[in-house]
Amino acid sequence: MMKALLFNGYSDNDSDAEMIGSLIVQELNRNGFEVEQILLRDANVAACQGCFDCWVRTPGECKIDDYGRDTAKKMVQSSLIIHFTPITFGGYSSELKKVIDRFIPTILPFFTKRHGETHHNHRYENRGSIIAIGVLDKPDDEKEAIFKELVYRNSLNMGAPVHEAIIYTKNQSKTDFISEFATILKKVEGTI
C-alpha cells in the first residue's frame, strides 16, 4: 500500500483550510493511499538545536526525544509527504518549518554533486515524493514564486523523486484545485 504523510501546518482552525485538507485526504484515499494526517498544532515538536548530534553521536536520530523524532521516522516510511501550510512571507508556517528542520537526521553529513550543485547524501534508500500546498488569502506573485523556489530547493536536497508546489488562493474553485492535485498524484504514482 502507498503511504502518504500529510503535515498540516495550520496553527489555528481555518474553515477554508479544513475543507481543502479534507478534499486532499479524500483524493489521496481515492487514489489508493493510506493517509496519516498530523495536525502540527497538536504535536510537541521542539525546534532543531543545530547541534548535528543526529549526524555524529546518534546517527539518524535526533537527540530531542519528542514527536519531531517520530515525524522523521514516519517520513522515511512514506511514499508521499505533503506539506500543507499557510504561506508566511513566502515560506512555511512556523509549525511546519520546525518539522522540516527536524528531517536533518534523514540525510548524511557528506556531500555529492547533483545537477551541478553540492547536496547532502541520503541516509536512507526510500525517499518519498513531496507535494507542498501553500495557501494564500489573495493572489501574490512574489510570495508564490518564493514558496515554489523554497519547496524546490528543499525537495532537491531531500532527493524527492517528484516534487511539486501548489498554491491555493482562498475562495478559488475547489474543483480546479483538486483537479491540479490529482494530476500531480498521477506523477507520484508513476514513481512508486
Image: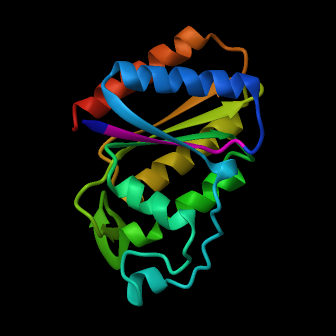
> Residue 36 occupies which quadrant of the picture?
top left
Q: Nearer the viewer, residue 152 or 5?
A: 5
Q: Is residue 117 left or right of residue 50?
A: left
In this rendering, is residue 46 above or below 125?
Answer: below
Quarter in which the N terminus is drawn: top left
**Overall secondary structure of the magenta stretch?**
strand
Instruction: Please provide percent x and percent y for residue 129.
Output: 35, 43
Q: Is residue 171 left or right of residue 130?
A: right
Instruction: Please provide percent x and percent y for residue 25.
Output: 48, 27
Instruction: Please provide percent x and percent y for residue 105.
Output: 42, 72
> Residue 87 occupies which quadrant of the picture?
top right
At x 22%, y 37%, the residue is: 191
Quarter in which the C terminus is drawn: top left
Q: Nearer the viewer, residue 124 or 89?
A: 124
In this rendering, is residue 178 above or below 99?
Answer: above
Total numbered labels:
0
Instruction: Please provide percent x and percent y for residue 176.
Output: 54, 11
Q: Is residue 177 left or right of residue 107?
A: right
At x 65%, y 61%, the residue is: 44
Colour pattern: rainbow
At x 25%, y 55%, the residue is: 126
Q: Is residue 51 magenta?
A: no
The region drawn magenta spans 3-10
Would you say residue 43 is visible in this rendering?
A: yes
At x 56%, y 77%, the residue is: 64
In this rendering, is residue 156 above or below 33?
Answer: below
Would you say residue 92 is visible in this rendering?
A: no
